[in-house]
Image (cartoon, helix red, strand yellow):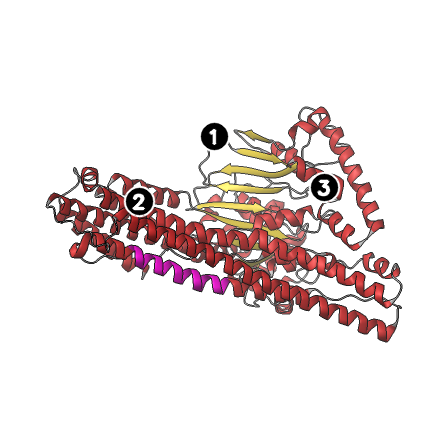
Amino acid sequence: MARNDHLLSVGNEALSEMTETMTSLTTQIDQLTEVADARSSARLAALKTKMENFSASVTMVGQVKAGKSSIVNILAGRPNLLPSDVNPWTSVVTTLNINTRTEGGTKSKFTFFEQEEWDNLMVGGGRLGELANRAGADDEMDDIRRQIGEMKSKSEQRLGKHFDLILGQSHQYDYFDDELVQRYVCLGDEDDPDIDPKTGRFADVTKSAELFMDIPQYPISLKLCDTPGVNDTFMVREQITLRSLRGSEVCIVVLAASQALTTMDMALMRIIAQFENRQIILFVNRIDELSDPVNQVPEIRDRIQDTLKQNNIDANTSVVFGSALWAEAALTGNPDILTEESREALNTFYLAAGFGDQAASLDKIWALSGLPDLLLAMNERIAEGAGTRLLDRVRHRARNIASQIRATAVAKTLSNSDGIVRDLDGASPEDAIARVTAEYEKKASELTTKLRDKVLERLASAEANFVKRATDSLISHLEQNGEQGTWQYDPAGLRTLQKAAYFSFARSMRKEAGALYSAAAADVEALYQKLLGNHLGEFNIEAPIVPRVPPPLGIGRTIALDLQSTWWRRWWQRRKGFEAYAADYTRLIASEANSITKDIEENQIAAVLENVRATLTDFMVEQKDTLLSISHSPDRAAAQIAEQKPQKSRDDILGDILKDLSNEAA
């Protein structure tokens, strides 16, 4: 562990309000539990568990050799934990679960590819093979198959008879160390004498690695996900990185100062362009390698902002400059690890920061490393994003549960005095409740079907428009230039149209689902009023919170139209005549455009709409349960709370807690 791990506490001030509110909410939930029936107590306990299990997901992406793993190691307080020179074959995503509860004392878990995933890579060449086949790039496919054959042969040699047995499995340990981690995520040299059939290297077939550790300097639970660079041979990394980014609260893009965004591969740019601007933090690493950092940093910042603007990313996106090497020197208390060039750059920065010419202190080295700024920016986004959403959901549920507790208590009082009222227009309570439940199940189904059909229609229109414009452009090129030279149409326009369709869907969903939820809450509240008359006093059932729509990351994945290389030259050379060009290109571009639409539909839209349905269903089930308890058997409601505090005391407590919860929300 690092000698100066107290430095990791810098930036926690951004989380203080969130953690204090969590503590306050926990106290209020405990107070509610004191006056709750068994059913409500179980729901309140689930709310507490939700807060206790809160974990913010932070994913690192970036160029190969930019220093992602080094930054993750620093954030974990364990320099050199993850290998920073992972072999390019490796496609392992490594997640550090910090301050997370585990069962059975598990400290590390390594999961292997499923047989189907491995077969897709070995037989079809993975995503790259899929694209090559679609584009008719036979020569590239031959090259891919050759590389795959070599990879498979080496994997089988390393793992021997264990090769077929471990696919789809996972290995778990009650510890982890550098050697164990490297065994699963880093191949090492081909001539490594440590390769053993029993305990050999598993990196070829390792899909993900998880490590579990406690870091008391962090006040919350974190998931730090270290992804390989996205520009790998078979595009396995891009697929895995996209999968890792789904659900991630913060995306930290790590760049090398010597390259910055000038040479960033477009695959990475396309991915981060789909995020909300406040989710992105750019960390420009290795400023210690710059020859004139004080003057070069502003120049690099200007170039980055220009590049962001060109790619429709907010130029106000946070950009932090720093050095993982400086951070490691401060964290370990060992400035001797700095090279002469790094030390000179540090001294230059030190003087420019106005620290004087005295010897650099470790705290000031830490400040200049950029890690405090990175931690602060990261924590701000966690607090304002996932943290705020969690607190809003917990307060909302707690207020509704408090209202249910009040209704149950009123039912007890009325049942004792034979004063319960059932003004349900002649229907039985069971029928009235079932009717409202069925009505909103039907409305939710109709709404989600309508939203799905509308967005798919708009996505199809985007595809058709793009195909037409691209084909028209190709024909125009052929008419002007004949069959000489090459031509390609930038698919950025397609992504713009698809993104617009997706965000239109998001706006419609929020508006229409919100209206449906509000109507459901009003009708449920009316049932309480009809069952219990005017005895409820101030009483309110709040509508469920509309689910969040995640960024459409599938739009950023690579398609054949993005690939420059020799594919297009060969594609061009194989075709003769205008009709062949236009027909083949139309088929290719339509297929590629549809592949993005399918990804958005299956991995984004379907999940959002299922969440819309599930949120309303959970709300209705919970309310139905309480309403039936009140209406069907008043004696049962009375029995559940027979040993609770007197009515006056309970009402006072509920009133105070509801007031507090409402004030905090405001």
Callout 2 amino acid:
Asp
Q: Which residue is mark 2?
A: 625
First-in-chain label (3 vs 2): 3
Query: Which image quadrant for residue 267?
Result: bottom right
Secondary structure beneath disc 2?
A: helix
Residues packed near mark 2 inside 10 Å, few (<14), some (14 to 19) or many (20 plus): few
Residue closest to the eye, 336 or 43 = 43
User: Is residue 359 at least partly visible in the picture?
Assistant: no
Q: How many marks?
A: 3
Extreme residue in the left direction = 417
Secondary structure beneath disc 3?
A: helix
Q: Which residue is mark 3?
A: 121
Tag shown at residue 105: 1
The x and y percentages for residue 272 are 60, 58
Secondary structure beneath disc 1?
A: loop
Residue closest to the eye, 325 or 318 = 318
Span of residues in magenta: 506-524
Extreme residue in the front direction = 426
**Is 173 drawn above or below residue 428 in the view shown?**
above
User: Is residue 332 at least partly visible in the picture?
Assistant: yes
Q: Residue at x 80, y 37 (%)?
A: 150
Callout 3 amino acid:
Leu
Tag shown at residue 308: none
Relative placement, left or right, of 181 versus 124 is left
Confirm whether the magenta stretch covers residue 317: no
